[in-house]
Each structure stands twice: as C-alpha cells, then as structure tokens.
Amino acid sequence: MSLEQDLLRQRTQFTEFSSPPVQLMPLVLPGCRMMYSTCARCHHRGHRKEGNKNGAFCQFEACAGFHYCGQEKLHPEFKVEKREVLL
C-alpha cells in the first residue's frame, strides 16, 4: 500500500471513531409496558432481552456496533480499536 492510501485509510478510521453516534429511541415490545432498563441484545432502552411481561423476549435485531447504539461500555472491541487508531 502506498503512503497516500495508508494515510487516507487512517484519516477515514479516525473520522469514523470520532464521529458521534445517533441517539436511539426507546422501543417497547408489543403487549409490554415501557421500562427504564436497556436491552442486552439490541441496546435500546425500554425493554430487556428476556424477562419482560408475559415472558416476552427481545424481537429486534442485535446491535450492530458502537455507532448504532452509542454505548461504548457495551462494546469493548470498539474501545480497543479506537485506542489503536488514535495512537
């Protein structure tokens, strides 16, 4: 890889890691009430992965990464990648 391509790749990664994520809206499962907890599967507030009313489980897709949910504590792999890129 040439130096210019490597520099462009690093700048792209830096921009990706330093851009703020979109704030997620709380999601309520059908037939359940709104909760103040965060789901361990999709990382939306409003319900849990399991143990909701009527034994309902999270029906939504699993979180795709930090830029989807914005919760760095739930994505330790993002913290490692960010630290490597910013050094």
Image (cartoon, rainbow, N blue to C red):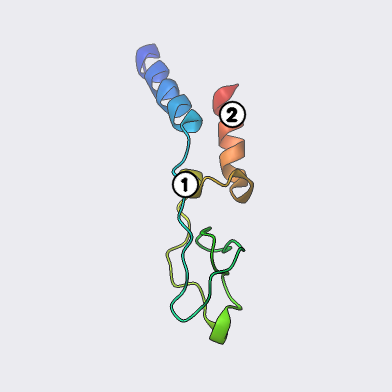
Residue toward you, 23 or 2: 23
The Cα–Cα distance between marks 1 and 2, rounded to whole angstroms, is: 25 Å
Q: Nearest to the eye among marks 1 and 2: give it.
A: 1
Quarter in which the C terminus is drawn: top right
Q: Amino acid at mark 2?
A: Glu
Residue 19 vertical position relative to residue 71 in the rendered view, above or below: above
The numbered mark, 1 or 2, whose residue comes first in the sequence reads: 1
Q: Which mark is residue 77?
A: none
Residue extending farthest to the bottom is 54
Q: Is residue 2 left or right of residue 83?
A: left
Q: Secondary structure at mark 2?
A: helix
Q: Residue at x 54, y 60 (%)?
A: 45
So how many labels did they put on this image?
2
Q: Amino acid at mark 1?
A: Gln
Residue 27 vertical position relative to residue 22 in the rendered view, above or below: below
Residue 5 vertical position relative to residue 44 in the rendered view, above or below: above
Q: Residue at x 42, y 21 (%)?
A: 11
Residue toward you, 9 or 26: 26
x and y percent of residue 67 in the render? Answer: 46, 43
Residue toward you, 13 or 54: 54
Q: How packed is label 1: few (under 14 Cα within 10 Å), some, or many (20 or more)? A: few
Q: Residue at x 48, y 35 (%)?
A: 20
Q: Which mark is residue 84?
A: 2
x and y percent of residue 14 in the render? Answer: 47, 25
x and y percent of residue 75 in the render? Answer: 58, 48
Per the image, the residue denoted by label 1 is 23
